[in-house]
């Protein structure tokens, strides 16, 4: 590691400002705010802010096309809609074999995940809602493409050719391999065609650098080391308006340090010069007999692509999740990064990584990787997951831990602040404060922050207020 010059872009001050982070108790106070939908308190917010929830699947929600809305609301992207409204494309991270939802032609008729597309006002009133992709699995996060589409990511490698995953449910009912990216147009329905050349692994999020014409991908391989990838399409999507399936998948490595362990705690301002190694077999299939349990274990299949990169020296991260592109820099979260080095190559129970989270930045032009923030403990930042950025250049970070979950702001100056606290309760009064925030995305004009509660009974929030007063 070298402590060279700071990365360019809107977050250049973060490195110098890491010491400014303070525990939550020292942050701006949040207060209970009633939901404009029904007057119940579901969020604590700063003074002057309001919100409305919608698509609360604690009770059945039927969309305009007859779809019974699935839960597990996860990653989400916002696009300009008609009449000043906002179009949201929202993932549903549903796992396990079962009938596909919605009236669209599914990728796999026995997979229960996908995306829904919603037109909504800036204050959370739903205008229309429909299915836009079905028959996929574990649609976790994704990314907004500048030509007007959402790329949704499957965080699994389930399929009829792979053994049961962590749930123990057999995959024999599935008809297609999973673990891919799918493109969903903001104004239409997905063709449900997987981008196989972009890899079959536990995808989390993507972001696109229009200057370089490259797609960047994070991997959340919970029990094993994860990788940071890029996909170089053969044709520039800024000209074709879509990602092609003819490109090259690569994995990040550190020059002069094969298999650099970046999941472990790093020194302040840790900076690395990156290079990229090719993945020769990005979309594996494994031998199996239809209707019979597959001989390939899920743990083997989920590491297959990453192991190719690590055999060529690729770096090891802990649970790479949310990412966003700003001014030629990719910012991404390592959810359990920053702790003591793992004692072995895997931790399938507690998750690979012993820390409370890191935020990294990768400069796409200089190919330099830099640690921007490493949490010193759960009382500062606890398991950062999905992220987005505001018009002021502040990162909005969704926490995903087993205690109180917050939306946090990470400013250009390296300061953490509290934006929202989950205080959702079920109809029977059960507290759901450990349900994670996910899918944070601002309306194109920056006025409204949309965010999900990712749970079986998921819901979506529209939040608005004087963002400038809290530095967001």
Image (tube, rainbow, N blue to C red):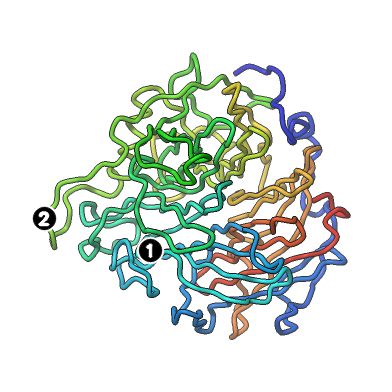
Could you tell me which quadrant the N terminus lies in? top right
For label 1, the residue is 95
Q: Is residue 245 above or below residue 363?
A: below
Q: Is residue 114 above or below residue 39?
A: above
N-term mark: 2 or 1: 1
Q: Is residue 431 left or right of residue 50?
A: left
Q: Is residue 212 left or right of residue 37?
A: left
Q: Nearer the viewer, residue 167 or 111?
A: 111
For label 2, the residue is 289
Q: Could you tell me which residue is drawn at 72 percent across and 68 percent down?
A: 122
Q: Is residue 442 above or below residue 117?
A: above
Q: CA distance from mark 2 to mark 1?
A: 22 Å
Q: Locate residue 223: give its quadrant.
A: top left
Image coords of residue 244 (percent x, y): 39, 42
Image coords of residue 302 (percent x, y): 33, 45
**Label 1's element?**
loop
The residue carrying pointer 1 sits among few (fewer than 14), some (14 to 19) or many (20 or more) residues within 10 Å by Cα, namely: many
**Label 2's element?**
loop
């Amino acid at each position: 590691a070298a402590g060279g010059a700071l990365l360019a872009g809107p977050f250049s001050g973060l490195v110098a400002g890491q010491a400014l982070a303070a525990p939550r108790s020292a942050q701006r106070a949040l207060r209970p705010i009633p939901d404009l939908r029904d007057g119940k308190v579901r969020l604590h917010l700063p003074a002057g802010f309001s919100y409305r929830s919608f698509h609360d699947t604690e009770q059945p929600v039927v969309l305009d096309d007859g779809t019974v809305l699935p839960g597990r609301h996860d990653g989400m992207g916002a696009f300009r809609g008609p009449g000043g409204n906002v179009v949201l494309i929202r993932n549903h991270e549903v796992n396990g074999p079962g009938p596909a939802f919605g009236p669209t032609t599914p990728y796999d008729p026995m997979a229960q995940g996908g995306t829904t597309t919603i037109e909504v006002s800036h204050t959370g009133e739903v205008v229309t809602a429909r299915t836009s992709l079905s028959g996929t699995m574990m649609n976790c996060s994704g990314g907004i493409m500048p030509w007007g589409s959402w790329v949704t990511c499957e965080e699994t490698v389930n399929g009829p050719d792979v053994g049961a995953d962590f749930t123990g449910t057999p995959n024999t009912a599935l008809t297609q391999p999973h673990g891919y990216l799918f493109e969903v147009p903001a104004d239409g329905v997905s063709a449900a065609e997987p981008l196989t050349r972009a890899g079959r692994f536990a995808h989390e999020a993507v972001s696109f650098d229009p200057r370089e014409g490259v797609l960047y991908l994070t991997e959340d391989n919970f029990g094993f080391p994860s990788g940071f990838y890029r996909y170089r399409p053969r044709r520039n999507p800024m000209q074709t308006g879509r990602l092609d399936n003819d490109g090259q998948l690569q994995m990040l490595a550190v020059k002069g340090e094969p298999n650099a362990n970046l999941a472990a705690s790093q020194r302040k301002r840790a900076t690395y010069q990156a290079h990229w190694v090719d993945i020769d077999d990005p979309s594996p299939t494994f031998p199996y007999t239809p209707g019979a349990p597959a001989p390939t274990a899920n743990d083997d299949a989920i590491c297959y692509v990453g192991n190719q990169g690590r055999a060529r020296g690729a770096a090891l991260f802990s649970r790479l999740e949310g990412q966003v592109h700003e001014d030629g820099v990719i910012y991404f979260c390592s959810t359990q990064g920053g702790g003591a080095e793992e004692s072995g190559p895997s931790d399938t129970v507690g998750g690979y990584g012993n820390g409370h989270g890191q935020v990294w930045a990768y400069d796409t032009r200089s190919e330099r990787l830099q640690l921007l923030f490493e949490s010193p403990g759960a009382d500062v930042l606890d398991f950062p997951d999905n992220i987005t950025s505001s018009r002021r250049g502040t990162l909005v970070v969704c926490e995903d831990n087993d205690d109180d979950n917050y939306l946090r702001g990470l400013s250009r100056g390296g300061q953490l602040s509290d934006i929202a606290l989950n205080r959702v309760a079920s109809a029977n009064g059960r507290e759901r404060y450990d349900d994670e925030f996910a899918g944070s995305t601002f309306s194109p004009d920056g006025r409204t922050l949309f965010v999900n509660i990712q749970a079986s009974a998921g819901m979506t929030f529209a939040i608005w207020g004087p963002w400038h007063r809290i530095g967001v």
